Amino acid sequence: MRTQLSKFIENPTQFKKYLLQWSNSAREVAFLDSNSYPQKYSSFDCVLAVDAFTSIKTDYINAFEDLHQYQEQTKDWLFGYLSYDLKNDTEDLHSANFDGLEFPDLYFFQPKKLFLLKGNQLEMHYLRFCDDEMESDFEEIIQSAVYTNLTSEVVIQPRISKEEYVVKVEKMLEHIQRGDIYEANFCMEFFADNSVINPLDVYQKLNSISEAPFSVYFKNDSQFLLSASPERYLKKTATNIISQPIKGTSRRHTEIELDKKSKTDLEFNEKERSENIMIVDLVRNDLSRTASKGSVEVEELCGMYSFKQVHQMISTIVSQVENTISPVEILRTTFPMGSMTGAPKISAMNIIEKLEETKRGLYSGAVGYFTPNGDFDFNVVIRSILYNAQNQYVSFSVGSAITSLSDPEKEYEECLLKAKAMFAVLS
């Protein structure tokens, strides 16, 4: 059971900075920020969960079943992540690529302290045994000093060269020409060994230049996710399910006419639209596995959205589920997100595994939360920096969808465009 306390926040933007700074001394932190991006399906402007009362950490074997039992037993707020390699739990798939980060495949925690911010209203939800700390914590938060401990430059290296990338994409195109797949998301890693960064500083910089609607600062002791994700994976509200895959990217420009042209060119680009529509079909199929009959609908096809770094093409697919279907089952039958795999999904994941050099881990997985009544909201982990402070290993990955219309050189350029913000904050 939790004790609830409400507060009026005069300056929510400033308060979020105080809240994040205050939280960073905790061993476990999940800070989710919408950055006031206009969203039809937003529940909160900002959420913070700190200090694990209970937690679950596991590899991929029986991971979804273990998570189901944990979620059923706690029936409380849970925050955490599903790594991409949980695909090995749901399908006959394997991951043997290099892993420099060494994060658990799945991690969730039940926070002692929870903060939900919407507009000027803050709700604090504390477990009963620590609710005597609510007022003193609030006073500490509003008196927090927001300071910046700068990160020195990190020397980033590509896991594969441009030449190797082009060869691998050409192999992917051979699979497409043979009919093994018709789309696959191919990714590559950039990394830095023996590097020490200030995760909070890096996150704040990344967030300020991106202002993405699904930004996350996630800390599990010495393991960090610093995410500026623009993409929602899946949201459940009562019996309503929403998925919002992104496929289609173009560059932002400071010159207004150039920027408009970039957005218009994306909107009518045959290759980018076909990429998006293929993934919409895949997501419709995934949602149908738990949906009430006839309830899967495409609410918006290839909608155009602008973020600080890029224009994106986003579709929205919705469905209805019966109350008898568990929230974890809805996640299990749709994971990983179609926008990060390809189609047909299992074939694409097999081919991806053979051609990529790095285990994806948390990249292209999902971070989010469950509510006590079984609702949930998860992002897709893209445009994100991962850091293991113990290993002193920094990593970020980028990818693009390969179809029969792909030009390997242009796909490489798209990857560098998506990596631009991560390079900027680390160098």
Image (tube, rainbow, N blue to C red):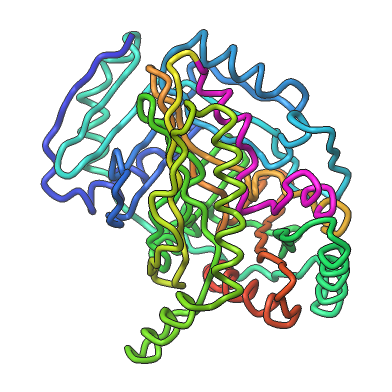
- Looking at the picture, tell me which residue is in the foreground, 98 or 176: 176
Of all residues, the one furthest to the front in this rendering is 294
Q: Verify whether residue 216 appears in magenta.
A: no
- Looking at the picture, tell me which residue is in the foreground, 181 or 40: 181
Taking the spot 88% from the left edge, 44% from the top edge, the residue there is: 96
Residue 276 in the image: above or below residue 332: below
Residue 261 in the image: state x and y as whole percent. 41, 87
State left or right for residue 51 relative to residue 345: left
Residue 294 in the image: state x and y as whole percent. 47, 33
Chief secondary structure of the magenta portion: helix
On-image quarter of the N terminus: top left
State left or right for residue 108 relative to residue 210: right
Residue stretch in magenta: 325-352
Q: Verify whether residue 344 appears in magenta.
A: yes
On-image quarter of the C terminus: bottom right
- Looking at the picture, tell me which residue is in the foreground, 246 or 165: 246
Residue 292 in the image: above or below residue 166: above
Taking the spot 45% from the left edge, 46% from the top edge, the residue there is: 317
